[in-house]
Image (cartoon, coloured by chain):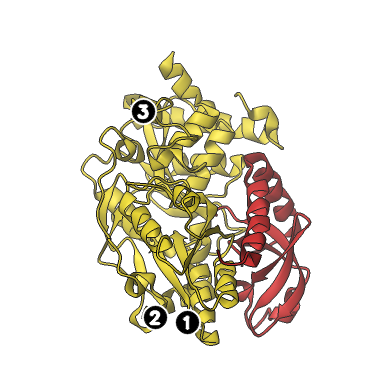
Chain colours: A red, B yellow
Amino acid sequence: MCLGIPGRIVTIDDAAKRLATVDVGGVKRQVNIACIVNDTHPAEACVGDWVLVHVGFAMSRIDEQEAAETLKILSELGEAQAEIEAMRLSEAEVGRAAS
Amino acid sequence: MKYIDEYRDRDKAAVLVKEIEALVAEIPLAKERPINIMEVCGGHTHSIFRYGIEGMLPKEVELVHGPGCPVCVLPMGRVDDCVAIAERPGVIFTTFGDAMRVPGSKKSLMQAKADGADIRMVYSPMDALEIARKNPDREVVFFGLGFETTMPSTALTVLQAEREGVTNFSVFCNHITIVPTLKAILESPDLNLDAFIGPGHVSMVIGTAPYEFIANFYKKPMVVSGFEPLDVLQSIWMVLKQIKEGRADIENQYARVVPDEGNKAALEAVEKVYELRDFFEWRGLGSIDHSGVKLREAYAHFDAERKFALPNLQVADPAACQCGAVLKGVIKPWQCPLFGTACTPETPLGALMVSSEGSCAAYYQYGGVKAEAGAA
């Protein structure tokens, strides 16, 4: 939750709503990019950016080398696997019918 | 140097440890008593244990593991409130997975789910909002949890729900804020801290300016740090250098992610949606003034505390639990009589055993070089 995970923005899904798809270790997931968009770097310019994703929100733009190094330590801590598993489980929970 | 072989740059780590030793030798205070440095953030605690950093440091440097694990400081009464909301008919309760096993006075969310409540582990508040869109006949509640790192994500989700006019979504807001907490620690009468390793991702949101009072008023150094072992070692070195030179400054070791001014868009969302509570209850630390936030009046219709009548009771921690003393650095986890016996990661009694960022779970999982030495 607090460490986040690096991902790369692959498509902009809805520029007005600040929604984009990131690739996190091969897993695709929609994230909100409101916190990394500004006048000099509009949503449309974000494709290809490496970002640090916290609970579905891109919170910081990072460079590719930083992303690779962060992913390595998160794997060693067991956090990367936990984040990706949480994304996968969450997708199933969103799709589940109310009991 | 038990784990040093795993470093991607072991030479750099060894050089840093040597430089730390050299610095410590030049600090007169270190000859009288250990220098106590608190890492505030649970992410740092996890990294310190995983890489055996305590065991590499000279004995004159003690790391005190601070309260920066939001799951660990969640009081039992709030867990009871979560269960009360989740067990209401027609409610879907959504939470980060970390909070599922935190003990309440009667049960955890995990147990409530087993008893039939519709509780869902979500990765993001966005997913909770999506569940609300898909289930318009249900009340969907998101358990907002965390320091400033996750506070903006809940705020932005509330703003999105507002734009869409979603009426069956609300937040049980338990977000906490770091600065009043640091103030409370600095004001505590048994304070024996010399410096701080500042949180990385909280600072990514709030910047470094909010910490200035620590240097200016309390004359304690702080270095905002990254999470990699080399980051932590370098930050310890920077803190010791300040102590040696008699300085107290707020320095930023993690500038590659933390801009000094923080994240403008995130701070705007936080300011718009939340206001400070008069006080907030912390497990083990008691009540701390202005340490939590709630939704502003303008967003009251998204506030689960107003939507549902909650028991909102204060519940004392189990008497034998020593979580508070561990959180404040008064005792080490293995000095608690329950540690590793009645309280384990599988059956946690205290919250510090629940999360991988809690110091008890970290000690239990990785052991501590100093703990082993102490227990021997």
In the picture, residue A6 is in which quadrant? bottom right
In the picture, residue B19 is in which quadrant? top right
Q: Amino acid under label 1? A: Thr
What quarter of the picture does the C terminus of chain B occupy? Answer: top left
The residue where tag 3 is placed is B338
In the picture, residue A17 is in which quadrant? bottom right
Going by the image, does B263 lie left or right of B12? left
Q: Earlier in the sequence, mark 3 or mark 1?
A: 1
From the top left corner, tell me how far across and down residue B158 is, in percent.
Answer: 49, 76
The residue where tag 1 is placed is B167
Q: Is residue B120 above or below residue B297?
A: above
Q: Earlier in the sequence, mark 2 or mark 1?
A: 1
Same-chain status of marks 3 and 1: yes
From the top left corner, tell me how far across and down residue B235 is, in percent.
Answer: 52, 44
Q: Chain of mark 2?
A: B
Instruction: Tell me the distance, in whole angstroms, between the alpha carbons under discs 2 and 1.
Output: 8 Å
Residue located at (36% from left, 48% from top): B104
Q: Chain of mark 3?
A: B
Q: Amino acid under label 3? A: Leu
From the top left corner, tell me how far across and down residue B200 is, in percent.
Answer: 52, 54
Picture disc at residue B301: 2
Picture disc at residue B68: none
Nearest to viewer (mark 3 / mark 1): 1
Q: Please, what secondary structure does the residue beneath circle 3 have?
A: loop
Residue in the foreground of this view, choosing between B153 and B62: B153
Q: Are marks 2 and 3 in contact (CB under 8 Å)?
A: no
Nearest to viewer (mark 2 / mark 1): 1
Q: Please, what secondary structure does the residue beneath circle 2 have?
A: helix
Residue located at (53% from left, 68% from top): B153
Q: Earlier in the sequence, mark 2 or mark 3?
A: 2
Going by the image, does B164 lie left or right of A65? left
Q: Amino acid under label 2? A: His
